[in-house]
């Protein structure tokens, strides 16, 4: 056999409940720590993405700080990985009023993404270093998605592959405010920013290519600056086949038979 591999246009990330005044699954009462940008920044900086790539993914991932991948139209190469610093993360938590951290549950699938439950387990250890006591609740995907799609979660893992290969798809589904009409349908952390919504609505109707690309870049940068999600990585997908078969690896992880040749 032979193996070919390529990057998938899917990013894997952690979302947070940013709407409720009090989290469903936390020991913090009377307020929601994830509404504080400093808390989101702290949790983002405490993630060692390179360690996840090296140990759990065996090199088969690309750490990222951006909502979409380079294969998707609108990708902004100027958005960099957040710096990894336990010390700065601790300082931010202290500044936000949580010097000893807090308790919270992380919901995670155990049969959906590559090493999903193992990654979530690693994240609980990383966040423990800055004082968070994270309870991991891992479950099969059928049970998991039924739970988080009802917004019955405080923190969750999600992966998003862009079927249209255009950034608007991810922005509408993951970042736009839920409106009950399709926008924000998978925004399970209920992130909401009127400026973000305005950018997305404009890009939906803008026909001037450079202007539309600028709107996409502004939205992606705002997503990163707001830490709307804690981005983890882009998956690399290996395909195995007999040596006499030639195939073209697709970023959407779909086999197109008209690109397959048998010698």
Image (cartoon, rainbow, N blue to C red):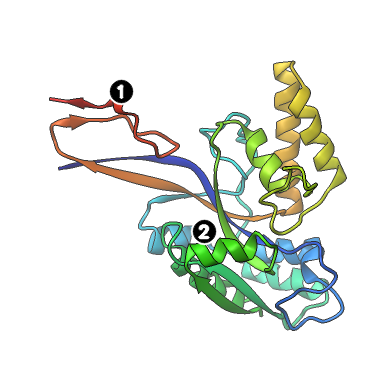
Q: Secondary structure at mark 1?
A: helix
Q: Distance between the Cα atoms at labels 1 and 2?
A: 37 Å
For the residue carrying disc 1, how many other residues have a C-alpha within 10 Å: few (<14), some (14-19), or many (20+)?
few
Kindly identify which numbered label has been placed on residue 258: 1
- In this view, 14 is above or below 133: above
Left or right: residue 45 versus residue 161 is right
Q: Position of residue 109 (x, y in %)?
A: 50, 65
Question: Earlier along the polypeptide chain: callout 1 or callout 2?
Answer: 2
Q: Can you see residue 45? A: no
Left or right: residue 209 versus residue 156 is right
Q: Position of residue 24 (x, y in %)?
A: 74, 75
Kindly identify which numbered label has been placed on residue 49: 2
Left or right: residue 148 versus residue 9 is right
Contact (CB < 8 A) between labels 1 and 2? Answer: no
Specify the quadrant of the image occupied by residue 191. Answer: bottom right
Q: Position of residue 49 (x, y in %)?
A: 52, 58
Q: Can you see residue 13? A: yes
In-front residue for pair 106/227: 106
Which residue is depicted at the point 27% across and 30% down? 247
Which residue is depicted at the point 55% across and 75% down? 137
Specify the quadrant of the image occupied by residue 170. Answer: top right
Specify the quadrant of the image occupied by residue 102. Answer: bottom right
Q: Position of residue 43 (x, y in %)?
A: 67, 66
Which residue is depicted at the point 82% across and 67% down? 20
Quadrant of image for the C terminus: top left
Which residue is depicted at the point 78% across and 81% down? 28
- In this view, 214 is above or below 53: above
Quadrant of image for the N terminus: top left
């Amino acid at each position: 056999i032979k193996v070919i591999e390529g990057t998938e246009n899917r990013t894997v990330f952690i979302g947070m409940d940013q709407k409720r005044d009090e989290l469903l699954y936390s020991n913090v009462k009377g307020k929601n720590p994830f509404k504080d940008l400093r808390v989101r920044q702290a949790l983002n900086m405490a993630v060692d993405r390179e360690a996840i790539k090296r140990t759990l993914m065996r090199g088969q991932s690309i750490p990222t700080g951006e909502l979409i991948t380079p294969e998707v139209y609108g990708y902004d190469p100027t958005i960099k990985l957040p710096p990894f610093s336990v010390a700065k993360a601790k300082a931010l938590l202290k500044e936000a009023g949580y010097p000893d951290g807090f308790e919270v549950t992380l919901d995670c699938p155990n049969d959906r993404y590559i090493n999903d439950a193992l990654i979530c387990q690693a994240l609980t250890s990383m966040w423990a270093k800055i004082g968070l006591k994270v309870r991991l609740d891992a479950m099969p995907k059928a049970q998991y998605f039924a739970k988080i799609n009802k917004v019955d979660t405080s923190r969750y893992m999600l992966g998003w592959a862009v079927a249209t290969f255009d950034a608007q798809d991810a922005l509408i589904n993951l970042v736009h405010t839920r409106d009950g009409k399709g926008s924000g349908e998978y925004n399970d952390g209920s992130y909401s920013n009127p400026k973000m919504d305005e950018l997305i609505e404009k890009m939906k109707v803008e026909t001037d290519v450079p202007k539309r690309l600028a709107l996409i870049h502004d939205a992606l940068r705002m997503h990163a600056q707001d830490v709307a999600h804690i981005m983890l990585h882009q998956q690399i997908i290996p395909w195995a086949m007999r040596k006499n078969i030639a195939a073209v690896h697709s970023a959407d992880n779909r086999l197109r038979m008209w690109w397959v040749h048998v010698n």
